[in-house]
């Protein structure tokens, strides 16, 4: 995936409103990584990613930008809270675990991709098998039809989903659940994998629909078709070259340590993080990984502490500092309507399932945006998260009453409805403004 910075920003624009500076910074960081990949090994080793600090209040898109970026280029992505490592009782402050967790994400990502690649092949094998299971069932209703013809009919039915609801009994693998051995660390031992060499996997017979059987068997079969060793080594490579680690609440570990409380360890945590960001080798159960080229994006509100309060060595590793702006009324209006997954579209799609055609008038949307801004000012400023609260409040009754056997109904949310539903949540002083 080699999108230019402009293309990356364009893609991000589909989901995130405003915050141009931050979008630009992450786009450049990503492209720099691509440029680097085109260089000779010698030069490559000289160039490290330009890590980024995102500064900005809560709910304005910091996490969302990083997450979308990772998704866009299918990069393994991990989000951690820096404060996690200051928690009392956190054993050994194992900050390296963030790298191991990133590799886990990467393994899952690569595995899913490989599974997709072999799915067609697996489907063929599975349908052949299901065909034999279904043959006697088909034969009872068509005793005079030759098997060869029945078989091709079954295969066609399987493909078209016409056999989905037939109940059958099949043998499937009885996979034991992985056992978590070290509480809290997420480290797991996959017993089935470990013992796989000694014991054949247990099988058990189960009754289920063809639809379900097909899904399980295709999964099983795809698993057999992919090579775990190559998945693991590719996952390591992918995490190493394309991984993004998002360190949230970095501001909470900045600042002078006082002598009491968890503060003592703040600077300690920064020192622990430093080698990882600078580049070191971490061992994981899938092999060793170098952290030199992982892209780190740190984020924080920096209300109390400043970026300059971080230890200089760490600051040096985050040369790009971008500020995200607080969201305005106009931003809220856009967030409600523009993104492909905009809240108004989400709710409309959800309610459609229950035969409700939901729409909003322009004035209603403007009022919602204005109320969001107002509520953020008069109570806590929670950024775009306010819109979630507003939508829930607004649509609670409609959501509750929809469903059942009623015919298709059209519901249009207008300004009056918005004021009636949300008026109570606004202070009287503020409400007057909306009524006139
Ligand atoms: N600029 C934006 N455009 C579109 N949606 C946004 C924007 N800002 C925030 N949102 C939405 O608001 C929610 C919260 O955003 P996000 O998680 O990015 O906040 P944040 O800046 O990381 O805040 P925090 O500091 O609390 O972690 C998400 O559902 C996100 O989609
Ligand atoms: Mg966040």
Image (spheres, rainbow, N blue to C red):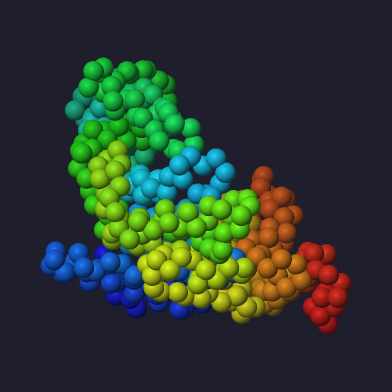
Q: Residue lying farthest front?
A: 259
| Image quarter hosting the N terminus | bottom left
Q: Look at 13% across and 66% down and name the residue there.
A: 42
Against 91, is 297 above or below? below
Q: Is residue 125 left or right of residue 392?
A: left
Q: Can residue 346 be seen by looking at this rendering?
A: no
Instruction: Name the spot of residue 341 as percent of width and height, x first.
Output: 51, 63
Q: Quadrant of residue 409?
A: bottom right
Between 4 and 402, the one lying in front of the other is 4
Against 64, is 366 above or below? below
Instruction: Name the spot of residue 368 as percent of width and height, x first.
Output: 69, 71
Q: Can residue 322 be seen by looking at this rendering?
A: yes
Against 306, is 140 above or below? above
| Image quarter hosting the C terminus | bottom right
Between 293 and 399, the one lying in front of the other is 293
Q: Look at 38% across and 48% down and name the residue there.
A: 96
Q: Look at 42% across and 49% down and name the residue there.
A: 95
Q: Residue lying farthest bottom?
A: 436
Q: Look at 14% across and 64% down and name the residue there.
A: 41
Q: Is residue 379 left or right of residue 154?
A: right
Q: Is residue 71 left or right of residue 144?
A: right
Instruction: Name the spot of residue 99 as percent of width and height, x first.
Output: 36, 49
Instruction: Name the spot of residue 48 as percent of width and height, x first.
Output: 28, 66
Q: Quadrant of residue 175?
A: top left
Between 182 and 377, the one lying in front of the other is 182
Marker count (numbered):
0
Against 249, is 186 above or below? above
């Amino acid at each position: 995936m080699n999108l230019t910075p402009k293309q990356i920003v364009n893609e991000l624009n589909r989901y995130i409103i405003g915050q141009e500076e931050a979008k630009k910074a992450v786009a450049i960081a990503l492209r720099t990584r691509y440029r680097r990949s085109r260089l000779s090994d010698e030069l490559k080793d000289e160039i490290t990613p330009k890590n980024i600090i995102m500064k900005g209040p809560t709910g304005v898109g910091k996490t969302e930008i990083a997450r979308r970026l990772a998704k866009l280029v299918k990069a393994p992505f991990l989000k951690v809270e820096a404060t996690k490592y200051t928690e009392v009782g956190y054993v050994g402050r194992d900050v390296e675990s963030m790298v191991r967790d990133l590799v886990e994400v990467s393994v899952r990502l690569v595995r899913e991709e490989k599974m997709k690649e072999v799915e067609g092949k697996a489907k063929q094998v599975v349908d052949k098998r299901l065909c034999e299971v279904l043959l006697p069932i088909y034969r009872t209703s068509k005793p005079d039809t030759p098997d060869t013809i029945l078989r091709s009919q079954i295969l066609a039915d399987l493909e078209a989903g016409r056999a989905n609801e037939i109940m059958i009994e099949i043998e499937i693998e009885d996979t034991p659940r992985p056992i978590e051995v070290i509480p809290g660390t997420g480290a797991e031992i996959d017993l089935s994998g470990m013992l796989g060499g000694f014991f054949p996997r247990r099988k058990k017979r189960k009754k289920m629909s063809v639809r379900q059987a097909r899904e399980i068997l295709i999964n099983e079969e795809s698993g057999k078709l992919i090579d775990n060793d190559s998945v693991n080594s590719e996952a390591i490579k992918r995490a190493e070259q394309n991984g993004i680690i998002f360190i949230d609440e970095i501001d909470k570990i900045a600042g002078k340590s006082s002598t009491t409380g968890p503060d003592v360890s703040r600077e300690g945590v920064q020192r622990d993080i430093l080698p990882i960001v600078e580049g070191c080798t971490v061992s994981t159960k899938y092999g060793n990984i170098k952290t030199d080229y992982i892209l780190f994006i740190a984020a924080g509100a920096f209300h109390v502490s400043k970026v300059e309060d971080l230890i200089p060595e760490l600051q040096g590793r985050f040369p790009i500092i971008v500020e995200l702006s607080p969201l305005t009324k106009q931003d809220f209006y856009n967030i409600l309507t523009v993104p492909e997954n905009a809240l108004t579209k989400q709710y409309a799609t959800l309610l459609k399932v229950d035969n409700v055609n939901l729409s909003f008038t322009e004035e209603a949307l403007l009022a919602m945006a204005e109320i969001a801004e107002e509520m953020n000012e008069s109570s806590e400023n929670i950024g775009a998260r306010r819109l979630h609260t507003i939508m829930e409040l607004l649509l609670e009754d409609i959501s509750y009453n929809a469903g059942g056997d009623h015919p298709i109904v059209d519901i249009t949310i207008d300004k009056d409805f918005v004021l009636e539903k949300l008026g109570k949540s606004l202070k009287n002083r503020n409400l007057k403004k909306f009524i006139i």
